[in-house]
Image: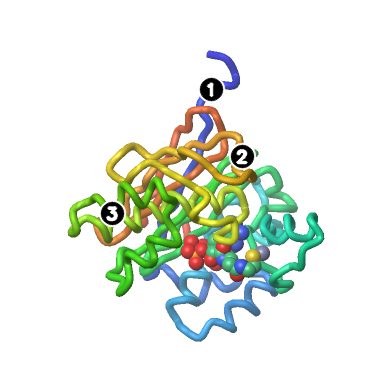
Amino acid sequence: MTLSSAPLESTVWWAHTSAASERLLRLLDSGELARQSRFRLQADRDRHLLGRSLARLVLAERAGCAPEKVTFELRCLSCEDKSRTGAERGDDAPHGKPVPTGAAQGWEISVSHSGEWVALALAREVAVGVDVERVSETRDLAGLAGYTLSDAEQQVWSALPAEGRVGAFFGYWARKEALLKATGLGLSGGLRRVTVSPPHAQARLLSWEGGGGPGAAWLSDLDRGSEYRSALAVLTDRPVQLAVHPPEHTADLLRG
Ligand SMILES: CC(C)(COP(=O)(O)OP(=O)(O)OC[C@H]1O[C@@H](n2cnc3c(N)ncnc32)[C@H](O)[C@@H]1OP(=O)(O)O)[C@@H](O)C(=O)NCCC(=O)NCCS
Ligand SMILES: [Zn+2]
């Protein structure tokens, strides 16, 4: 096997919001604590706390250092692109993908939360993006599909049986957002520019309109039950060996 075709390891941890505990607050840095206190809803505080504290614990273990030695730089590629082209930046408040710095430099992570679930994805040296979405009835689903799905995706989606469309929509969304989060562009990268395979087919990036897309991407659905859709993107042309830690494992890790 040549080195370039050797599988690349990526790991996902699932945390349930019931694992959130005050004890984890000690793992947050001052910026995260300030953000934590700005959330009005307990559920948002729990999800944010779990995402960042889990990331620190996992990275500390991988880097062989204390959790407080793990630091993050927030990078939003959309805003970096705008400032490179001289366009006005939308938002100057720190935001974007948490990129490990300090002792954990070289590792890449992605965090996602929806409803009662938090996902953390990790890989070494290659960018990852994870997304979890709760399937929810939306009043104007066709309208939403119109500005989030690409033309090719809409053609497939609108021909699906009516009862499968809500789940399929969130399946598309999770795959596309996982890719946009892996690149660091986030939703400002434009959901409609990204075309992925239909939810009933194996997950794959089909096209990325207008440049700025990844050279290569591995994409896979994750399973969080029928009420959620979730996907992982790893920006590599190598095969990916995925390990998934269920919520029980993650709860043990969080308890210390
Ligand atoms: C950030 C964004 C990708 C999150 O999507 P979402 O479905 O609402 O939420 P998720 O739970 O899946 O993801 C949230 C996490 O994504 C990460 N994230 C934030 N910006 C990101 C980016 N540009 N790329 C990758 N990941 C990003 C963060 O870790 C965040 O969680 P945390 O702050 O608790 O650590 C999306 O809301 C977005 O792109 N927003 C930007 C829109 C905007 O404000 N534009 C103006 C400035 S660019
Ligand atoms: Zn931005």
In this image, 27 relative to 75: left or right? Answer: left
Q: Is residue 21 above or below residue 142?
A: below
Q: Which residue is mark 3?
A: 158
Q: Could you tell me how far apart the alpha carbons at marks 2 and 1 are, in whole angstroms? A: 14 Å
Q: Which mark is residue 126?
A: 2
| Residue located 27% across and 70% down the image | 137
Picture quadrant where residue 188 is located: bottom right
On the image, the x and y values in percent for residue 225 come to: 26, 55
Q: Nearer the viewer, residue 171 or 39?
A: 171
Q: Secondary structure at mark 3?
A: helix
Along the viewing direction, whichever of 19 and 95 lies nearer the viewer: 95
Residue 119 is drawn in which quadrant?
bottom left
Residue 220 shown left or right of residue 23 in the figure: left
Q: Position of residue 132 (x, y in %)?
A: 41, 58
Q: CA distance from mark 3 to mark 1?
A: 39 Å
Left or right, 83 with reference to 78: right
Residue 91 sits above or below residue 107 on the image: below
Q: Callout 1, which amino acid?
A: Ala
Question: As shown in the figure, which amino acid type bears the numbered disc 2?
Answer: Val
Q: Position of residue 77 (x, y in %)?
A: 68, 55
Mark 3: give few (<14), some (14-19) or many (20+) Cα within 10 Å: few
What's the mark number on residue 6? 1
Rendered-image quarter of ligand 1: bottom right
Q: CA distance from mark 3 to mark 2?
A: 35 Å
Q: Amino acid at mark 3?
A: Ser
Q: How dense is the environment of label 2, judged by Cα within 10 Å: few (below 14), some, or many (20 and up)? A: some
| Mark before the other along the chain sequence, 3 or 1 | 1
Q: Residue at x 79, y 56 (%)?
A: 85
